[in-house]
Amino acid sequence: MTLRADLLCPEAYGPPRPARIDLVETHISWVFLLERDVFKVKKPVDLGFLDFRSLEQRRRACEAEVRLNARLAPHVYKGVVPVHEVGGRASLHGEGPVVDYAVHMARLPDGCRADVLLERGELTGEAIDTIAARIAAFHEKLAAGAEAARYGTPEAIAHNVKENFAQTRDAIGKYLRPEEASEIVGWQTAFLRDGAQLFERRLSQGRVRDGHGDLRLEHVYLQASGAPVVIDCIEFSDRFRFADVCADIAFLSMDLAAHGRVDLAERLLARYARDSGDYDLYALVDFYEAYRAFVRGKVAAIVAADEQLDAGARERAAAQARRHFLLALSADRRSLVEPAVVVVGGVIASGKSTVAEHLGLEMSAPVIDADRTRKALLHVEPERRLDDPAWQGAYDPAVTVAVYAEVLRRAEVVLASGRPVVLDASFRSRGLRAAAHRLAEKGGLAFRFVECRADPSLCKARLAERASERGVSDGRLEIFDAFCARFEPVVELPAAEYTLIDTARPLADSLKTLRARLGTWPRGLVA
């Protein structure tokens, strides 16, 4: 009995027999693709980081895969089915001794898989936003208890990193020069040493959770509705699945970069940070992207060394190994876009949030806004209205001081990672604008203030329209006049740092003006 060969025969399946069976082989599984169904069988292998040699180990892994993947793909995973020996052949149909187990899945259309969409040029920025929101919501629901915490200590993270180096010691010389391999080891080791407090802080903030563990483009499917379905999480090892949420989202951003779309990688991170409120991830994301790239290089090197595969498959795996190892090497390289502080301010309903959002997309930069920051500090859902009177309650001056301090703190974390940042808040006083200016000066960075302005009648009309809609902003007619009365005119900034935008004009015209004044992402650049 040869299980792999037997399950490629239509007779191995119940009626109606499939007209065609395709095989996808990974380093740990055989995946049999039928027209509407998928059956995945674990290989009886021991790769050091997993052990599937016994039937019981494979059964437990199959059951864990179905249970865990129900979180992000509840209608895809149908259950675990036994593989029987029938007439001396492996079969998923009939009676006989159980010789193995298979995960039964519904087959999703290949054409809606994220890597396929990307290759066709159809993976849009809007799709990336949807994926980021889905992963942020997934992470938000996960528990951050004692079980998760033991996998997020500096020692646990260091163990995983050093294991990677040990498991590739004999193979990496086929893909990198010795000095390049040493540079990766040196940089990641130094980050582990110097960033111990960062890892401890993430742990205390509850950011280490039971995540996905293998968040790659080929595991993300976009349904006709646009809603993402994510399959194939890590089931064989808790220590690879329990991790900082940054390590999870960094896997997907790394994969986008590996496919030549750094712009989409940065957009993913920016939208995830906004939706999760986790801008502190920028202190660690380059490390985790490098870690994930190295893991993918390691796996590809294992496949490239598998002599049971055909030469073409091994050559493709070798090329992937080199690409990912090089990506890990680039982690501490300079960004394609210079870091800068771009502030978008103005009175209520002046259009600043719309301009800030589009600037963030133009710059592939995160947008940090005062509205979400205020609600995060007050432990309020982003779209819950705060109807306190002007300068009271949530808008008490002391609260506002704390909000702007947190906006600038988050911005400093982003800037330290070598990325630009867009700040979206009124910045109604010279003192608040000066604080943002000092942040730029501290890092020797460019500072740009964009003031959005519109006729008061237009602002009031926008507020009247907004009153019946759900949204993050709490600006309303009742406080408009009081707010405008305290807005201090922007007269202190030199012309090189100040741009006035009339938001009554078409947005496209405003963006054209801003592109000429700001360091936006180079047009046409994707890698």
Image (cartoon, rainbow, N blue to C red):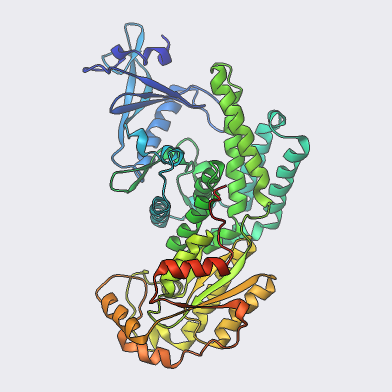
Q: Pick whichever, 379 or 217, lies toward us.
A: 217
Residue farthest to the top?
87
State which quadrant residue 230 falls in: top left
Residue farthest to the left?
16
- Spot occupied by residue 347 in the image (x, y as percentages of width and height): 43, 83
Residue 458 falls left or right of residue 403: left
Total numbered circles: 0
| Residue under the point 30% across and 27% down | 37
Can residue 444 be spotted in the picture?
A: yes
Q: Pick whichever, 49 or 212, lies toward us.
A: 212
Residue 457 falls left or right of residue 41: left
Q: Pick whichever, 143 or 329, lies toward us.
A: 329
Can residue 233 be spotted in the picture?
A: no
Residue 495 falls left or right of residue 72: right
Is 244 rendered above or below residue 88? below
Q: Pick whichever, 434 or 45, lies toward us.
A: 434
- Spot occupied by residue 318 in the image (x, y as percentages of width and height): 61, 28
- Spot occupied by residue 143 in the image (x, y as percentages of width and height): 42, 54
Residue 478 falls left or right of residue 339: left
Residue farthest to the right?
179
| Residue under the point 47% across and 23% down | 43
| Residue under the point 48% across and 35% down | 236
- Spot occupied by residue 323 in the image (x, y as percentages of width and height): 62, 36
Quadrant for the N terminus in the image: top left
State which quadrant residue 8 falls in: top left
| Residue under the point 51% across and 82% down | 427
Is 73 rendered above or below residue 398? above
